[in-house]
Amino acid sequence: MNTAVDPETEAEILLQGLPASPGICIGKAYLVHQGGVTVAKKYFIHESKLEAEKNRFKTAVKKASDELRRIIRETPEEFREQADILKTHVMLLNDKMLYQKSIDTIQNDRVNAEWALRKVVSSLKPVFMNMTDDYFRERWHDIAHVSDRIMQNLSGEAPVDIRNIDKRVILVARDLSPAETSQIHLERVKGFVTDLGGIASHTGIIARSLQIPAVLGLESATHMIRNDDLILVDGFKGRVIINPSEENLIKYEEMRYRYEVQVARMSRGAEAPAEAMDGALVQVMGNIELPEEVVSVRDYGGDGIGLYRTEFQYMSGNRFPTEFELYDKYRDVVEVMAPKPVVIRTLDINGDKAVSYTYPSEETNPALGLRAIRYCLQKPDIFLTQLRAILRAAVHGNVRVLFPMISSFEEVLETKRLLDKAAASLKKEGIPHNRDIDIGIMVEVPSAVILADIIAKEVDFFSIGTNDLIQYSLAIDRQNRQVAHLFDPLHPAILRMVKRVSDVARETNITLAMCGEMAGLPINIPILLGLGIQEMSMNPRSIPLIKQTIRALSVADTRDFIGEALKQTTAADVRKVLEEAYGCELSDKCYTE
Ligand code: PEP
Ligand code: MG
């Protein structure tokens, strides 16, 4: 991060982060405090105030207990298991080792309740962690949860509820979870600024898809920016300016205007097909997270929805949606797009997209954990509900179903078995549905690339998810700002993997699509065309630009060029040969120069 001027002077301060979503916005900062509970400070309590301090602790515990009981009451019957965990937490709240020991510590050490609690919890940690039985070691996490809850009540720090934001602001947060982002009233948010997160993080993806300028990975934006500071967000270059000068305000306002004119000009021609110079046709589609975004895909001239990320409907509520609720939303999207295709991807929760009401057991490495298809195969009831909703929506238009994070052949077989089961149950109940839909898998785990020839026999299409394929094959956490500079779709290993999948798709005559962020950047398009990608899906706003890029290229030429690109040994060299061969028209830098 780069700080140009001392904050005390009130002069302009420049922060450099990652350009996660293009666009420029200027407005007041709104800080969302997150990232855990305030660190407890120690202070002594006068003899005469000890009773009051103990009561303060008791009140915080009582409040935590009331909160937990309310959550338990609101937990649907089918999630009794999770409710049971919370019941243990209620018991732990009053457990002697936590409750009584904290009260004793307040009394004996004459310290504040936060410090007493912290001391007790720290002394308990080694006791649990040294136990040989896994079950007891795990109980440590329950204690940590319970003490966090009490601590939060003691500090009186209520988490900011983003749903209540009532003015047009730029959100500044340590990080924004997908669940939170999905609850934001979009018309009230001008831009996103975060300390954490890389370009391929879900906050980045959502910002792009909502067309909200965003700069992520600023590391200490939440310390540098104060509530109500005037800030300027440059989503092209990844800059945030606090207290921008008059000169910068004028310069950026002009840039914003030029960009909007450019976007409007391109959108006018967007309806026309993406026909390359040699007549080859490419399908350019949009990725959506929320059903409401279907309109922007249509307005930007999308040839369909290439990726409908369905998890967000699960994240915005406090229980699993019902079959009818899902069907109703899918049907809306399918009807708006008909006869164009809608690729509905089944639930991809966990990893970085946790759903609060499932109370997932803590995973040390969630990206490698019970995520996506693994979760669904372990919870067939939840999965069948969604599959039935998809098959019902398929009656209303052109639906394809896509399974995320497939890493083995058995998963494909089991998934198809459940799809058949969903169809059979609908048939038995006489509910209209359509089982005759194309089935595809996301190719986003290296093992799926290697097994592509085997899996191809069971599916109708592949959709390459470069966001995760890069994460899993290059071992780069897509959320981690520290390694964001290594996250490069032009890495020769990624190009070789895409080539392998493309060879298999051609040999087995199945459709090859790409729905990862790689497809939304003009610089990558000659490579993707050269590798035989027939369908590309991206954030809706990129559609006109990508269509325009395709129209300026010849697919036959890109096939000649791809040999050269695949010969390169580094991403920098790939980029160099691309720039030499295709030049500046492939870059969207021109808006801001
Ligand atoms: C991907 O991994 O490339 C992808 C499109 O899926 P998501 O970003 O939702 O993980
Ligand atoms: Mg993915």
Image: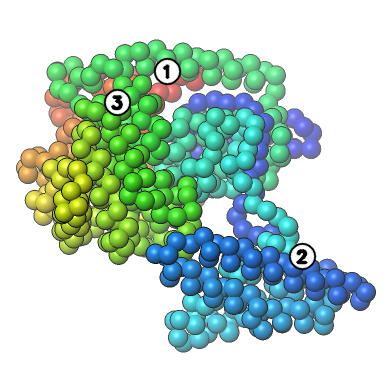
Characterize the local packing of mark 1: few (<14), some (14-19) or many (20 or more) Cα atoms within 10 angstroms: some
Identify the coloring: rainbow
Characterize the local packing of mark 3: few (<14), some (14-19) or many (20 or more) Cα atoms within 10 angstroms: many
In this view, the residue in front, 78 or 334, is 78
Question: Where 221 falls versus 37 (above or below)?
Answer: above
**Residue that badge 2 annotates:** 41
Q: Residue at x 48, y 62 (%)?
A: 75
The x and y percentages for residue 149 are 63, 65
User: Mark 2 or 1 closer to N-term?
Assistant: 2
Q: CA distance from mark 2 to mark 1?
A: 52 Å
The x and y percentages for residue 444 are 28, 50
Q: Given the image, on which type of amino acid does mark 1 rest?
A: Val
Does mark 3's beta carbon lie closer than 8 Å to ligand 1? no
For this orientation, the residue located farthest to the right is: 48
Dots 3, 1 in contact, CB < 8 A: no
**Residue that badge 1 annotates:** 263
Query: In the drawing, does residue 374 fall left or right of residue 153?
Result: left
**Residue that badge 3 annotates:** 302
Q: CA distance from mark 3 to mark 2?
A: 55 Å
Q: Is residue 502 visible?
A: no
Question: Where 543 falls versus 362 (above or below)?
Answer: above
Characterize the local packing of mark 2: few (<14), some (14-19) or many (20 or more) Cα atoms within 10 angstroms: few
Q: Nearer the viewer, mark 3 or mark 2?
A: 3
Q: Is residue 225 visible?
A: yes
The x and y percentages for residue 489 are 32, 41
User: Mark 3 or 2 closer to N-term?
Assistant: 2
Q: Residue at x 31, y 13 (%)?
A: 269
Question: Where 254 falls versus 297 (above or below)?
Answer: above
Secondary element under disc 3, as helix, strand or loop, is: loop
